[in-house]
Amino acid sequence: MRGFILRRKRNKTFTRTITTHWKTKATCACSKTLSIFFWDTLHVKESLLDFGSGPTPVLSELLHRRNVRVDCYDKWYQPKKIYTDRIYDGITSTEVFEHLDDPIAILNELNIHLHQGGIVALMTLFHPKMQADFFQWWYRRDPTHITFYTPKTIGIMAEQCGFEMIKDDGRRIAVLRKR
């Protein structure tokens, strides 16, 4: 399974559920971890896009506190594509890519809206390397999670879309730089 994007067909009766209190706390912790991990890789820190910001854009609030202008887009909660005529220094995407049926198309789209040398910081839990562990993995049981990654697969997608992967944490975060 290593090196492959694993996909599952999306349930056609998919409905979005309201984020519970514990999930919001977890989102805060993950957003803070992501912002710390990618912050030093940004050369310019003036404008960012939070792509898939969710119902409560926690990461954008953390970045606002650092005096960064952040635009938010989320297909369900903030569906206006505010980013279509803008170019950003960085783009974050927290817990989004596992929901995508065409992640390469999205990476190509994000590339268009990024300054040369800008970064994309992705957060999605990387799947276990062993097949037996994958089948026991709680993350795959979410019916909205249809695509799973390893750092290697993200690196391959990055190359195909005009990025280089500059670092990952081996668990859930990858940072890509536009070439």
Image: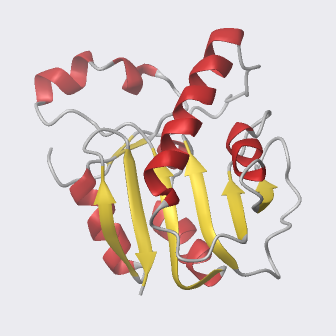
The quadrant of the image that shows the N terminus is top left
Q: Residue 119: x percent and y percent?
A: 51, 71
Q: Quadrant of residue 96?
A: top right
Q: For this rendering, which residue is in front, 168 or 6?
A: 168
Q: Please determine whether, in this image, residue 179 is positioned above or below residue 21.
A: below
Q: Residue 7: x percent and y percent?
A: 37, 44
Q: Residue drawn at (58%, 38%), measured in percent from left and top?
A: 31
**Image color mode:** secondary structure
Q: Please determine whether, in this image, residue 39 is positioned above or below residue 44.
A: above
Q: Residue 143: x percent and y percent?
A: 51, 26
Q: Residue drawn at (78%, 51%), measured in percent from left and top?
A: 64
Q: Residue 140: x percent and y percent?
A: 38, 26
Q: In this rendering, does residue 102 appear at all?
A: no
Q: Residue furthest front?
A: 66
Q: How many numbered marks does the figure carry?
A: 0
Q: For this rendering, which residue is in front, 137 or 124?
A: 124
Q: Residue drawn at (12%, 22%), measured in percent from left and top?
A: 132
Q: Is residue 63 left or right of residue 115?
A: right
